[in-house]
Image: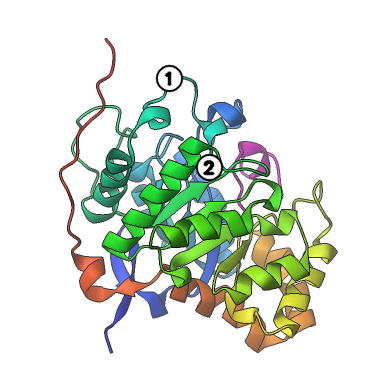
Amino acid sequence: MRELQVVTVSGAVSAASLGVVDAHEHLFIASPALKGGEIDDPGLVAAEVREAAAGGIGAIVELTPIGLGRRPDLLRRVAAETGVAVIGATGYHRDAHYPAGHWVHDAPVELLASRIVADLAEGMHPRDWLDDAPPDPARAGAIKAGASYQHVSSGERRRLEAAAIGCLRTGAAIVAHTEVGTCGHQIVDALLADGAPVDRIALAHLDRNPDPGLHAEIASRGVTLVYDTIGRIKYHPDSVRLDLIEALVRGGHGARIALGLDLGVRDYYRAYGGGPGLGYLMGAFVPRLRGRLGDGATEAILVTNPARLFAIAASTASTAASPAVAPVDVPS
């Protein structure tokens, strides 16, 4: 049996070494759709990650994609300073996160895919492919994708295809944003049509639409559900998420659930003076989850499931074929 590894910003590690995984976070992000919410201070981010580590988090999946202020250099710094494994991301978000005129809107699938593969195989581009800078030493270990509320635009459809190509060439998992938990089946259908293996697909934010019947349908297809708005009381109380998880586990779908907080703006960070903070998952939510599910099912959700999702064969984690890539011309 081939060893399974996970590509972190510090290098490939054994999937079994990750421990508890927060499967969706943003440690550095700057999006026009979230103006004023930038997370950009490495000292504050490291302090926040240390709080998570003190609660038992061993790894964080950082899903800031191309064009939203990725900082692979700072991800490496935070990982080194805190001892927490950080899995970085390539790929693209939904349309709303890219301003008019951004190269992502008009890029053909081949270019979109080549940049995903380069980020995974060679190292993440340090400035979101806006110049011809050499890659950062930190390789991406996951692919982000996304769709809009209740529909998938033509641009988002191209980017889903590019994500599927990146997945096929490298084995990296795809985590797709669902806006308010919509378009789950449509996103999965699109990725499968483009050849992505179903066990490499995860959907984020489905807990924004806490419909256990719908979620059971999607999980039955072999897709991982990343419940990642935990602690966001403005959407639903945590009791709703606990009920949802318990219903899915009782229905036999416990192997298809992973958890995160998706703290995508600075107001969600304790270090920036907000909340719930990265310590919330293990400090507040997981004790309640253990009370519902017991230790075995809880450990599967926190440890086993995300390790399986983000793991790839060791030979692929060490080397991956990369096509030639080209920079985008930036107007002077």
Crowding near pointer 1: few (<14 within 10 Å), some, many (20+)? Answer: few
C-alpha separation, residue under disc 1 versus residue under disc 2: 32 Å
Q: Is residue 133 visible?
A: yes
Judging depth in this view, the residue of 230 and 112 nearest the camera is 112
Q: Amino acid at mark 2?
A: Leu
Using the image, determine if residue 37 lies above or below residue 88: above
Residue 272 painted magenta: yes
Label 2 secondary element: helix
| Residue 206 placement (x, y as % from top left) | 67, 58
Residue drawn 53% across the image and 39% down it: 94
Judging depth in this view, the residue of 282 and 99 nearest the camera is 99
Q: Quadrant of the C terminus?
A: top left
Using the image, determine if residue 188 lies above or below residue 38: below
Q: Quadrant of the N terminus?
A: bottom left
Using the image, determine if residue 36 lies above or below residue 12: above
Residue 259 painted magenta: no
Using the image, determine if residue 247 lies above or below residue 134: below
Badge 1 is on which residue?
Answer: 101
Badge 2 is on which residue?
Answer: 44
| Residue 141 placement (x, y as % from top left) | 36, 59
Magenta-highlighted residues: 261-275
Q: Amino acid at mark 1?
A: Gly
